[in-house]
Image (spheres, rainbow, N blue to C red):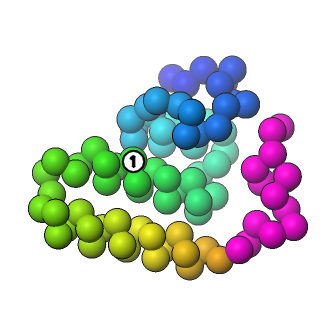
Amino acid sequence: MIALELLPLKLWELQMDSEALAKYLEQTDSISKPWLLAQLRLKKLAERRGEMTAEAYEAAIADLHQDVMNLGEWWVGIEDKEFGDR
């Protein structure tokens, strides 16, 4: 279980595997935030990298990149609410 004292930390500061990250997202009610789900996908991809061909890994990274780019600039004007310290 992820200690809730860690909540003020940024996700990229936490060293955890994809299972722990998924639990953290659930515990912090962040599962509906698409940019965090992309981070979870990236973590899972990194964990599977050794099992993938270079081409498959590059294709998966490109797919994830496109999905992140498709999010657009939805955060403009609400940066403090979405990314600020709470």
Report the number of discs. Answer: 1
The kind of secondary structure the magenta stretch mainly shows is: loop
Residue drawn 48% across the image and 73% down it: 67
Residue 63 pos. (x, y %): 37, 73
Residue drawn 64% across the image and 38% down it: 10
Q: Is 16 placed left or right of 71 in the picture?
A: left
Q: Is 17 placed left or right of 33 in the picture?
A: left
Q: Secondary structure beneath disc 1? A: helix
Please name whichever residue, 49 or 34, is drawn nearer the observer in this view of the structure.
49
Quarter-of-image position of residue 59? bottom left
Q: Is 75 placed left or right of 36 in the picture?
A: right
| Chain part drawn in magenta | 73-86
Residue 75 pos. (x, y %): 76, 66
Residue 72 drawn above or below residue 51: below
Quarter-of-image position of residue 47? top left
Residue drawn 73% across the image and 31% down it: 8
Residue 76 pos. (x, y %): 81, 69
| Residue 47 drawn in magenta | no
| Residue 77 drawn in magenta | yes
Mark 1 residue type: Lys
Please name whichever residue, 58 or 31, is drawn nearer the observer in this view of the structure.
58
Residue 81 drawn above or below residue 66: above
Read off the residue under disc 1.
43
Identify the image quadrant of the C terminus: top right
Residue drawn 22% across the image and 51% down it: 49
Please name whichever residue, 15 or 19, is drawn nearer the observer in this view of the structure.
15
Residue 38 pos. (x, y %): 49, 59
Residue 49 drawn above or below residue 14: below
Q: Is 48 placed left or right of 9 in the picture?
A: left
Query: Tag 1: Cα neighbours inside 10 Å, few (<14), some, or many (≥20)?
Result: some
